Image (spheres, grey):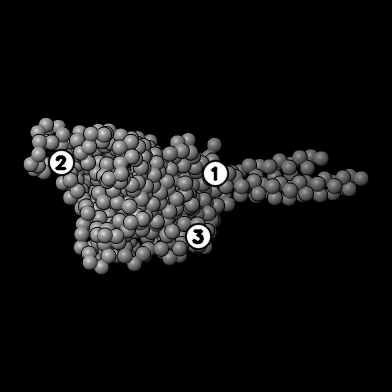
Amino acid sequence: MKRSLLFAALLCSAIMASAQTKSDSTTKASSTDSLMNTLSSPEKGEPVIATFKATRLIFSQTTETVKKKELNFLVIHRFGDIAGAQGGGKTFFGLDNSSDIYIGFEYGISDNFNIGLGRSKYEQLIDMHLKYYLLHQTTDNSVPVAVSLFLKGGFKPYHVETNIYDNFANRFAYFAQAIVARKFSSALSLQISPSYVIDNIPFPLAPTNENNFFAISAAGRLKFSKRMGIVLDYFHPFSRFRNNSVDPKFYDGLGVGLEIETGGHVFTINLSNAQAISEINYMSNTTSNWAKGQFRLGFTISRIFDFNKKHKSAY
Amino acid sequence: MKHIGLILLVWFGINQAGQDIYVCKNAVVNIYSKAPIEDIEARSAKGTSVLNTTTGEVAFAVPIRSLKFEKALMQEHFNENYMESDKYPQASFKGKINEKIDTGKDGVYPVTATGVFEAHGVKQNRTIPGKITISGGNLTLTSEFMVACKDHKIDIPTLVFKNIAETIKVNVTAAYSPNK
């Protein structure tokens, strides 16, 4: 009796012991895992980066800003009409003409605040701008969109024979925009930008032409590889004068392009009907029609220079 | 009956003695790329690690987004183009230290850990060398190893080939505290 009891007890403890080592080893393994999980709980609400690769698409500003102490050098070019009366073989499909050339700089005062300066061939417009990245989209969607504010002042410096610029203030025009963008996936980003244009002397000179009007832009990018994407850009001015005018007739802007990023550069090669590059000009003055062959080849080169002080490498 | 009690008591005692788990929440991770045109480095102090000195189990993870570069554009490209950190948010190692460590004895122990290293969603079986330093009950692990971009399907386009090294040096320092 005593012996069998001892035997039973030993057996029992052996089973218990083996069960315990088993459960012990599994809890140990999972305890490492669960410990890791508690340690590396994913940080919530990180800002979404790289909604767009550059500060411009075709016409539009994007929500992106140049980061602190970075300088963005921009060359934007629009050729002449590819087809239609001004295009075709005689102008080598518009390449002999340039409807607008823009050279500009953007500098990052901080990661979210930029100043910019540029000059267009079109209207010889010299413009300065401020851009502020107000709201960053977050990974947890607590902020579902990115919002940037953009302000631009333009100045037309050229000499005129008429008296329109007798009042110096007439040389100025302004543009304000709120850019709302969302990066839906690493490939797809879309944005919509309510805008307002103020022009002290709006062209064409007509009594019904408005000094100020609302406009809207919509644009998007679809990446098909890590470094290349299709961009689409559209704008529409809510201007009674422009919607009703017959001669000249105004059209909404529509552009389609290919965006290529190579590291420090972003190139955009595009086709669009708008002749001008600066918002003040193209919102007011797009009289070219895709259907009449009045679209053109254009490109944007954006090159970032970094002025952050380099510390000595520890490598 | 006395014996059973004794056996059980001893058994529990053995089990209780084996809980030497150490954790680190602020491990420092440095990565270096040395290429003809430029040297690039990035640093994070947000690595996490768990080390079980009894079983030798070691786990390590670092959020890719936490690696900070000198140039903002580089950091963006690192996340967007190379590591795809939205898809693969962290790099990790999980394995076992091959050598026995006596946490009660101060000293520097050269060790190797064998396990799975994961980066950019690609798992690789690796044996990684390291060093464990024990001094006055404090436990520090350092390790330096190389990661070949192509082993983890990280493509470097020919255009920027001279800017980015094919093999990235990774440097890890974790100072542990006992898990309570």
Q: Which of marks 2 and 1 is nearer the N terminus?
A: 1
| B85 and A23: which is toward the camera | B85
Q: Which chain carries label 3?
A: B
Q: Look at 61% across and 47% down and name the residue there.
A: A30
For badge 3, the amino acid type reads: Val
Give the residue pinned by disc 1.
A37
Alpha carbon distance from label 2 to label 3? 57 Å
Alpha carbon distance from label 2 to label 1? 61 Å
Neighbor class of circle 2 (other Cα within 10 Å; few <14, some 14-19, many 20+) is: some
User: Mark 2 or mark 3: which is in front?
Assistant: 2
User: Mark 2 or mark 1: which is in front?
Assistant: 2
Q: Do labels 2 and 1 share a chain?
A: yes
Q: Position of residue A137 (x, y in %)?
A: 42, 39
The answer to whether residue A12 is above or below residue A83 is: above
Give the residue pinned by disc 3.
B122
Q: Is mark 3 on a helix, strand or loop?
A: strand
* Quadrant including the N terminus of chain A: top right
Q: Where is residue A158 in the image (x, y as percent from the top left)?
A: 11, 43
